Each structure stands twice: as structure tokens, then as C-alpha cells.
Image (tube, rainbow, N blue to C red):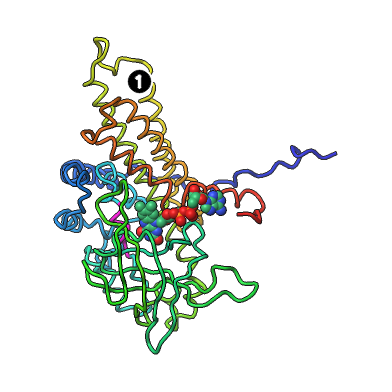
Amino acid sequence: MTSTQDRPARLLEPAPPVLLPPWHTPEREALQERARRFALEEVLPVANELDPQKGLLPESLLRRMAELGWFGITVPAEHGGMGLGVFEYCTVSEELARAWMSSASILARAQGLGTAVADPARRAELLRRSARGEWIGAIALSEPDAGSDLAGVTTRAVPDGDEWVVTGHKRWCGNAEAADFIQVLVRERDPAPGESRSRGLVNLLLEKERGSFPPGLTGTPIDKIGYHGFLTWDLVFDGVRIPRGNVVDEAAASDADGAAAERAGFLQAQRFLDTARVHTAARAVGLARAALEDSIVYLQEREQFGHPIADFQALRFAVAEMAAQIEQARAFYRQVAHLVDLGVRCDKEASMVKLEATEMAVRVTNQAMQLHGGNGYTTERQVERHWRDARLTTIFEGTSEIQKRIVSDRLLPRSPLT
Ligand SMILES: Cc1cc2nc3c(=O)[nH]c(=O)nc-3n(C[C@H](O)[C@H](O)[C@H](O)COP(=O)(O)OP(=O)(O)OC[C@H]3O[C@@H](n4cnc5c(N)ncnc54)[C@H](O)[C@@H]3O)c2cc1C
């Protein structure tokens, strides 16, 4: 009789055949140092002042980030960007998130987002604007009834002459009002019988003025418990008109008639989410670091039983565990960022690192609050902000359950129930 051990399931595929990355190059260390200094000196004081009032990222801070080139870290140098990779993008983002998660999140609304239009000259112009922080967008994928199940998007785009007419309801669109554009995932047709439910979805580029909504679009801000710095919107599209040429994706950029765009619409949303998931892991590491660094200071200041509480072994061990978890998550996100930069398929790894790093950030910020005792449960200390922001990271960019589903679907035959 053959036992399962004679034919063991291959739980983990061999690591992709890539060289070990030279993580500690002098250039990367210098970039990280620059980002760290900026985050602590220029972002943290603003966060401490504005977050308690649910204030928005100030224009002056965005301008400084633009001067440093951070809206174009991954934009090619010939288009005015820094010409670097997801690795560097995540490195800077970890540092910014250590100060204020929203400042790291706004970077994701540039980096060449909303530039994959068919006309090469226009694309080049948008890339230059993106790199300068003058083309900062918003992404409208989710809907009230289509969150985890993105293939369930029902917002419709109907062709009318040389325009699309868009009608539907989007939810959770961060930065929508302040954006220069909104990239909207819409259904252009129903899938044919036997086709995947994701067929018929395309991404459209809605250009707009910063600070307002175009005719036919109504936005209502959603009152969140954290992630202040920019607003998150509920959007109702009632006959919003978008030029037919404003289909955005890589396929459209090389296929002027846009026919391939439909095939690629859903896949593009997925590719976008892969990079977004590594970026979320980096932000989660930044938040956990913030909680740990604040705790290390607090433990040495606070005295009980005649000793700094840093002398109590239980608390020292908690610090050690927090630090170890952070280092582990950082090493993992750097590895996955490196794979993304190499163009290696890594959707499974992107899901794994998003899952692990964000769950780690929830644990570590929660532990940090415990280490602060009663003072942790006040708005007088920053640890409550790190905890509130970390709590979101297991929900957006695909929940932890969805990441587990993606990973398990690669390890087991797909279940009819998922
Ligand atoms: C503050 C904030 C900002 C956001 N920003 C944006 C944005 O800018 N643009 C955008 O498009 N979206 C954005 N989102 C939306 C976000 O991506 C979704 O909230 C997320 O994908 C989950 O969708 P949902 O909220 O509809 O939850 P649901 O999909 O309804 O999930 C509810 C619960 O069911 C679980 N679940 C669902 N399906 C399964 C399954 N098959 N197996 C196991 N468990 C399952 C989920 O894990 C979760 O626990 C944002 C969300 C928030 C809260």
C-alpha cells in the first residue's frame, strides 16, 4: 500500500531561482537614512498634531515629498522619476509609515498610477506629472456589494459616441476628492455563458480637478476610526462621462483599439494588488516599529515597584518577541519586493507577506498598548494611533482571509466554495 508519505504533497514550491539580493547597498542605506530623517523630523510632528483632529495631509508636506522625488520612486528616470524599484518604494514607505501611515499611503497614488493610456506621448506626459507629484490619484475598485469578490463589480460603463457613460456605486475610495484622477473598475459587458465572472471588467481613467467632483459624481466621506490624513469616500456615479480613449492598462498602452484592455482589466487589478500588498506589508512593518520604538522609550521612563518597568523580565521578553517579529516581516517583504522587481510571478508570496506582516502589526501594536498600561489607552500617547492604523492593514488591499484563500488555492485543488 502506498502511504501519503511515499508521495508527499509539495507544500512549498522551490524558491524562485534568483540570486540573493544585495540588500545593503550604500545607495539603499542612504535612501533609508534620508527617509528616516524626513519621517521623524517633518512627518511625525505633523501627524501628532493633525491625526487627533482627523486632519488631512497638508499641501506643504506633499510638496516636500514631491521635492524629494518620492511620488516617482518607481517611475523610469527618462520620465523624470527616480528609476528605482518596489524595494526602494517599500523602504521609503516603511519609514514614512513609522511616522504616519497616510504619508506612506499617498505615495501609492502616484508611482505611474493612472498613466497606462494608449497614446505614448500622453503617457509620457502623465508619467512626468506622476513623478513630480502633480498626478496623484484615487482607486475605485470596491463597491458596497463587491469587496473581497471584485469580480462582482456592477458599476456599468456604456459606450455613447466617443464617450463612456458610467453609472453605479463605489465605496471606500481613498483620496477621491483631492485626486487629479480616479481609476475606476467598471463592467463594460456581462460575461458570456461559460466565461469567468471577471470578463467584461475594464479600468477607466476619470480626470478631474483636485478638490471637487465632476458632473454626475457625488461623494460622501466615510467616518473612519483611524487612517486619518486623507478622506475615504462613498461615490455615486450617475451618468459620469469619460472619453472612450481613457481605458488604462498595460494592454491598452500597446493596443490602441483597446480590445485587449477588456481581457486584461481584471488581471491588471490583480497585478496592482500584488505590488500594493508588498507595500502594505512595508507599511505594517513601519507601524509595528513605531509601536516598538515608543514602547522602548516608555519602559525606561515609567517606574513601578521602585524600578523602571524595563527591568521586569516579562516586559523585556515581550520587547524581544516584538523585535524578532518585525525583523522577520521586514526580511520577508524585502525578499518579495525583490521578486516583484525581477518580474518573477509572486502573487502567492505577495499574499503571504501581506498576511504575515499585517497580522504581526496588529499583534505588536496591541502588545505595545499593553506595555503602556493605562497611558496606552489614551490619546495622549501615539501608540493608540499605531494600533488604530495597524488594525486596518489586515482588512484593506484584500483581507487576511482572502490572502489565505489565495495561498491555499495554490497549495490545494480549488474549492467550489471559495
Ligand atoms: C479605510 C479603508 C480604505 C480603503 N481604501 C480603498 C480604496 O482606496 N479603493 C478601493 O477600491 N477599496 C478600498 N478599500 C476597500 C477594501 O479593499 C475592502 O474593504 C476589502 O477588500 C474587504 O471588502 P469588504 O469590506 O467588502 O468585506 P467583505 O468582502 O464583505 O468581507 C467581510 C468578511 O468576510 C470575509 N470573507 C469574504 N469572502 C470570503 C471568502 N471567500 N472566504 C473567507 N472569508 C471571506 C472577509 O475576509 C471579511 O472578514 C478600503 C477599505 C477601508 C476600510
Residue picked out by circle 1: 315
Q: Residue furthest right?
A: 1
Q: Position of residue 179 (x, y in %)?
A: 26, 65
Query: Does residue 45 appear left or right of residue 156 in this picture?
Result: left
Task: Tell me the residue at 30%/53% (across/down).
Answer: 223
Spot occupied by residue 70 in the image (x, y as percentages of width and height): 25, 56
Question: Is the residue indicated by label 1 positioned so its CB lies within 8 Å of ligand 1?
Answer: no
Mark 1, secondary structure of its residue: helix
The residue type indicated by label 1 comes to Leu
Who is closer to the viewer here, 56 or 377? Answer: 377
Quarter the C terminus occupies:
bottom right
Indicate whether residue 110 is drawn in magenta. yes
* Magenta run includes residue 277: no
Rendered residue at 14%/55% (across/down): 60
- In the rendered image of this protein, does residue 392 appear above or below residue 162? above
Task: Read off the magenta span.
Answer: 105-112
Residue 194's image quarter? bottom right
Instruction: Tell me the residue at 63%/54% (across/down).
Output: 417
